Image (cartoon, grey):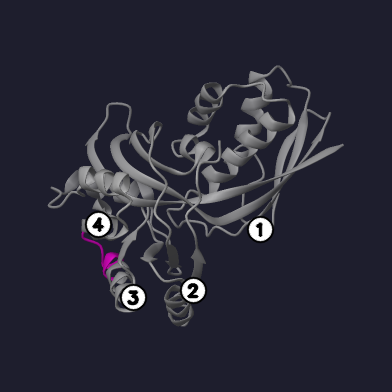
Amino acid sequence: MNTITEKAYAKLNISLDVSKAREDGYHDMVMVMQTVSLCDELSITLDHTGVVRAEADLRYIPRDDRNLAVKAAKLYFARTGREETGAVIRMKKRIPVGAGMAGGSSDAAAVIRALNRTFGQELTKEEMMALAEQTGSDVAFCVVGGTALAEGRGEILTPLRDMPDCTIVICKPDYSISTPELFRAIDREKLRIHPDTAGILEAIREGNLAQICRRMYNVFEDVPDRRMKIIGGIKTKLINKGAEGAVMTGTGSAVFGIFTDENTAKKACSAMSKEVSFTCVAKPVGALL
């Protein structure tokens, strides 16, 4: 049996905008996404059973097709004519679940990268992206990683210049926020504020971290929800502890702050760990393909 390993890197939303609901039930999005060093660790053991299943160090992680990593492996085997191939996908989960950090999508993306490497790059980058899009909305970005503008459901990607060097403190309170619930709320509300996406893109092109941080925004923070007050409180504390800017990622509930000084970031993380159930320090990661 052949065992391969791959890291599944988390994603953060530097900005997130929702433009309109679509007829297919999804929403058109405009997002600036960033891969970070916080990651799950995957070990994939191939066999000839034709069965694909997942194992994780968290009991509530599904083992069947509800797990995007399992779905991705099955799609890869079907696409490459290897339906007789089976796999056990073992996961060490480090990315918090229900955080808006694409933990499940990053696992699926890692499976696609690992299998394609193992089988001699059978699929082109474009074919891998198509497979990723079939797996889930954020999977395509998680396959390629780095810094990118994501549009549509998140599958239309434009690579951007790497983020300037910085240190990121991530804080996730001990609750999650329902993604469908937030989208329903967005449909009911008239959004008052939208991120300056063009300004963020220009700041990234210029490598201007201060201007990036000034413009970070997530429209879901504008939803009237008592939990957003907690999100706002975490953002304020991160900024008071030295962050250049702070924002919620995805549909939450994780919040992150960007720091120019690593020691200041570590001190902030240590202080926030006394108040928030999950905290960590991470760094930006460049393109994975």
Residue 289 has which mark? none
Q: Position of residue 98 (x, y in %)?
A: 47, 56
**Dot 1: what SS?**
loop
Residue 59 has which mark? 1
Kindly indicate whether the residue at mark 2 contacts the one at mark 3 (C-beta within 8 angstroms). Answer: no
The type of residue carrying mark 3 is: Gly
For residue 202, which quarter of the picture? top left
**Residue 175 at least partly seen:** no
Residue 242 has which mark? 3
Q: Which residue range is magenta in the image?
A: 224-229
Cα separation between marks 1 and 3: 37 Å
Q: Which residue is mark 4?
A: 211
Q: Residues within 10 Å of mark 1 (few under 14, many from 20)?
A: few
Which sits earlier in the primary sequence, circle 1 or circle 4?
A: 1
**Residue at (32% x, 43% y) in the render:** 31
Q: Does residue 206 appear to the left or right of 77 in the view shown? A: left
Q: Position of residue 19 (x, y in %)?
A: 21, 38
Which sits earlier in the primary sequence, circle 1 or circle 3?
A: 1
